Image (cartoon, rainbow, N blue to C red):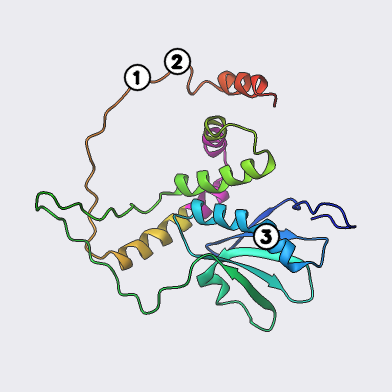
Amino acid sequence: MASHGGPVKPSPLAFLFSGNEMIIQCTATTQDQSTCIKILEPVMNMYRNINDGKCCAIVRRRGTTQYWIVSVTYAETLDKNVFDMLKRNVDPIINQDPIPYEPVNASGVTKIHIRRPRNQFIIYRQWMSAKLHARDPSIPAAIISQIVAQMWRTEKPQIRAHFRALAIEEDRLHKARYPGYRYQGGTRHTTPARQGEDDPMTIGQRLIAAGH
């Protein structure tokens, strides 16, 4: 974030992990906290979207211009003598009981849709897509998806192991929240794959055509 009286621009975002928690970090070069929060609000919304609507917050380390965007659950574990929670996107639900999953068979009644827990690749794809989009918002989403798929295939074993651990933890939390959940897949309508969809040259050609 720039200062000196001109327009304040966001600094590059850093994506960190603390255990299973993804942290988006930004270090500002202005002391104007309200301006920083205003700039970081869209990033907080992005964090929420890529984490399936998880309640999140902007926190600031006292005495610095370092801001974090984290889940509210994680923010509440931080030392309140060191961090201040500045803004949260929704209020927490107090004393919420696990939601049992009960199939609804009565005609005319719509079932509550419960999302399946994400697997390791889906978590990686959401995280890496956010990083690529933050670097260059003009890259089309379809191109980012293909790039991320290739990156995952060549990713280091320790990176894959990290996201496997995240998926296992998410599955554990999902089972605790929806103890009777059973996945019921719907009818899938397949369509012919587009020619060259997985061809690495196609990705390069599209990037060149898009000016990247």
Image coordinates of residue 16 in percent, x first then y, are: 64, 58
For the residues labelled 3 and 2, the Cα–Cα distance comes to 44 Å
Q: What label sits on residue 195 in the rendered view? A: 2
The residue drawn where x is 59% and y is 46% is: 130
The residue drawn where x is 57% and y is 41% is: 155
Say which residue label 1 marks. Answer: 192
Q: Quadrant of the N terminus?
A: bottom right
Q: What label sits on residue 38 in the rendered view? A: 3
Q: Is residue 30 above or below residue 85?
A: above
Q: Earlier in the sequence, mark 3 or mark 2?
A: 3
Seen from this angle, which residue lies furthest right? 4
* Magenta residue span: 147-163
Q: Amino acid at mark 2?
A: Gln
For the residues labelled 1 and 3, the Cα–Cα distance comes to 45 Å
Q: Is residue 150 above or below residue 31?
A: above
For the residues labelled 2 and 1, the Cα–Cα distance comes to 9 Å
Instruction: Tell me if mark 1 has few (under 14), some (14-19) or many (20+) residues whose alpha carbon lies within 10 angstroms of its own.
Output: few
Which one is in front, 117 or 10? 10
Seen from this angle, which residue lies furthest top? 195
Seen from this angle, which residue lies furthest bottom? 81
Which one is in front, 200 or 58? 58
Asked if residue 162 lies in the magenta stretch, the reply is yes
Instruction: Tell me if mark 3 has few (under 14), some (14-19) or many (20+) residues whose alpha carbon lies within 10 angstroms of its own.
Output: few
Q: Quadrant of the C terminus?
A: top right
Q: Amino acid at mark 1?
A: Pro
Image coordinates of residue 103 in percent, x first then y, are: 16, 56
Q: Main secondary structure of the magenta part?
A: helix
